[in-house]
């Protein structure tokens, strides 16, 4: 076996190859700030002011990164998250600014209400309950507003039943038949999201999200969730988080023929960064983790590590 592991040979026989094209870079766009704001629980990551979003994209392009997913921190919130579908909302303005400057980059938008509601949940709340069906028209309207602003792909993350169908119908009716849907199909109720809630100001005011996000113990249920999303019109499916759910990525790869995205989430990022800062791990750990996600079967990886690892992939 060692014959093919010589230094000048081993690269020829690699079964898994990671490239910049596999990476999607998250950007937190905050319309309440004028300078980049460090995210305390995510070392070396920042909220970006709306006025600086083009510069952030330009810096990524210079490194070879061409795909982005946008999350918004709005200037106002209400009970139904109406700023999520406001034509002058933070994401709508950010997408327009980026597309005016860099029309060829790929912009994916997160379609959810948690960042825009006063209660912080992903759907409409009635009497302390998250109401699924009342939420669907709102996320459909939000997806259309993103497409109108120039988004290339919309990505519903709220785990509402029927969300893909609602968005597909809304997009088609509005004339955006060519806009694909990247669905957060298997999104688990994970502890690894905690830093993201600081980053996006999306913490919930009561209860938790276990009523609509998946039970961490279940695998077959994930395949059912994915199958339903595909039937409803999903073009790309996603598993979130990535590292604790590599088995789910592999199962999805073996069961379905669609492109698979995996979200290397904030908690995964922060724990690795903390270990590197303490000297317990080297930066090579980042590469190893991303390769493992790709090897499990992911075609695309959303990761906060993209800017620091992309040079290794050139």
Image: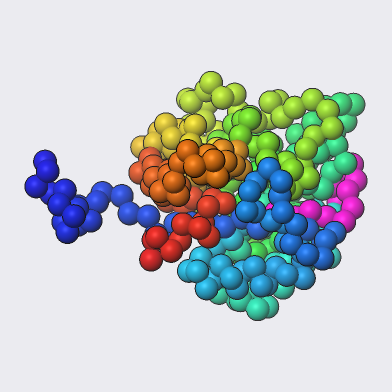
Compared across the picture, whether 17 is left or right of 130 comes to left
Q: Position of residue 193 (x, y in %)?
A: 65, 37
- At a point 47% along the width and 25% down the height, the residue shown is 220
Q: Position of residue 253 (x, y in %)?
A: 39, 40
Residue 123, can we see it? no
> Which of these two is toward me, 176 or 204?
204
- At a point 75% along the width and 34% down the height, the residue shown is 132
> Which of these two is toward me, 282 or 71?
282
Q: Give the color scheme: rainbow, by chain, secondary structure or one colour.
A: rainbow
Q: Position of residue 204 (x, y in %)?
A: 80, 34
Q: Main secondary structure of the magenta part?
A: loop
Q: Quadrant of residue 123?
A: top right
Q: Quadrant of the C terminus?
A: bottom left
Q: Is residue 118 above or below residue 10?
A: above
> Which of these two is toward me, 55 or 151?
55
Q: Position of residue 245 (x, y in %)?
A: 48, 33
The residue most toward the left is 3
> Which of these two is toward me, 29 or 288?
288
Residue 56 colored in magenta in the image: no
Q: Quadrant of the N terminus?
A: top left
- At a point 78% along the width and 58% down the height, the residue shown is 30
Q: Exactly how many numbered labels are in the figure?
A: 0
Q: Is residue 132 above or below residue 50?
A: above
The residue most toward the bottom is 101
Residue 77 colored in magenta in the image: yes
- At a point 61% along the width and 34% down the height, the residue shown is 192
Residue 44, can we see it? yes
Q: Quadrant of residue 310?
A: bottom left
The residue most toward the top is 217
> Which residue range is magenta in the image?
71-82
């Amino acid at each position: 076996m060692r014959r093919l592991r010589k230094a000048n040979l081993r690269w020829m026989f690699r079964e898994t190859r990671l490239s910049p094209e596999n990476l999607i870079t998250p950007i937190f766009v905050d319309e309440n700030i004028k300078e980049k704001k460090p995210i305390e629980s995510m070392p070396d990551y920042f909220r970006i002011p709306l006025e600086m979003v083009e510069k952030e994209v330009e810096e990524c392009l210079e490194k070879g990164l061409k795909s982005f997913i946008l999350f918004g921190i709005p200037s106002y919130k209400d009970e139904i998250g109406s700023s999520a579908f406001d034509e002058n909302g933070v994401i709508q303005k950010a997408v327009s600014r980026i597309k005016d400057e860099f029309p060829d980059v790929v912009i994916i938008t997160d379609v959810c209400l948690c960042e825009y509601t006063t209660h912080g949940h992903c759907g409409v709340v009635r009497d302390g309950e998250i109401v699924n069906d009342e939420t669907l028209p709102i996320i459909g309207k939000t997806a259309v507003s993103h497409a109108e602003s120039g988004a290339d792909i919309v990505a519903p993350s709220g785990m509402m039943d029927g969300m893909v169908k609602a968005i597909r119908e809304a997009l088609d009716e509005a004339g955006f038949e060519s806009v694909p849907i990247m669905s957060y199909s298997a999104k688990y109720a994970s502890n690894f999201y905690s830093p993201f809630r600081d980053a996006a100001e999306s913490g919930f005011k009561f209860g938790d999200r276990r009523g609509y996000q998946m039970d961490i113990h279940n695998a077959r249920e994930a395949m059912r969730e994915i199958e339903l999303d595909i039937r409803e019109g999903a073009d790309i499916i996603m598993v979130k988080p990535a590292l604790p759910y590599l088995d789910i990525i592999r199962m999805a790869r073996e069961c379905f023929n669609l492109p698979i995205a995996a979200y290397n989430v904030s908690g995964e990022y922060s724990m690795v960064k903390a270990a590197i800062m303490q000297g317990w791990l080297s930066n090579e750990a980042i590469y190893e983790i991303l390769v493992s996600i790709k090897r499990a079967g992911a075609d695309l990886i959303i990761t906060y590590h993209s800017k620091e690892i992309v040079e290794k992939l050139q």
